Image: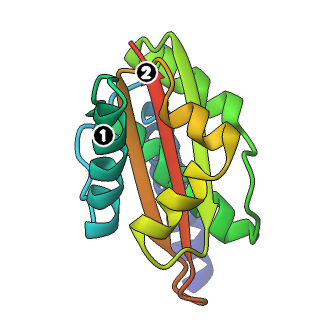
Amino acid sequence: MKAKMFRALLPIAIVFTMVSCSSDSSETASSDREVVTTYNYNETELKIVTLINNYRQSIGLNTLEVINHISYKSEEHNFYMIDNNVVNHDYFQQRADNLIKVLGAERVGENIAYNYLTAESAFAAWMNSPAHKANMEGDYTHLGISVTTNPETGRKYYTNMFIKK
């Protein structure tokens, strides 16, 4: 009796599992095609936006408008760095291609930082690096920022992306 019930329910369980998996994968794929419109900014992220825009304004450049989708892509990179215990620009081209495809970006730049306690200290490090400073002074119109704390170590990962539309 149990064997007959098992054989009868097994195909239903398999179909249910397959439907669940295909639904999850399509949600992941849609984030690569659709604009992410919500992002919850923390105090450090908001401070970095202010520091960058104040600096740009002080040298006669336009301020940059924040786009939540760029912050979302920045956060994805922070999660990648945390999950893989690395600090790098791996997969930058894929992030840039997404911003080009989804937002119509003409140009994309990226700054990363690791283990700075405050927005001011991360900003100062970028100011002291010619390549990072060039991104902050670049011909861009929009930006996104993510500062993510590794729950195991308490260390912060920063990804700041810039685009020109």
Q: What is the three-letter code of the residue carrying label 1?
A: Asn
Considering only vertical position in the picture, is 154 above or below 102? below
Which is nearer the eye, 34 or 91? 91
Quadrant that contains the N terminus: bottom right
Which is nearer the eye, 158 or 79? 158
Q: Residues within 10 Å of mark 1 (few under 14, many from 20)?
A: some
**Residue at left offset 46%, top offset 24%:** 163
Mark closer to the chain start, 2 or 1: 1
Residue identifier under label 1: 53
Quadrant that contains the C terminus: top left
Residue identifier under label 2: 140
Judge whether residue 15 can be spotted in this image: no
Left or right of 79 in this view: 145: left
**Residue at left offset 47%, top offset 47%:** 19
Image coloring type = rainbow
Q: What is the three-letter code of the residue carrying label 2?
A: Tyr
Label 1 SS: helix
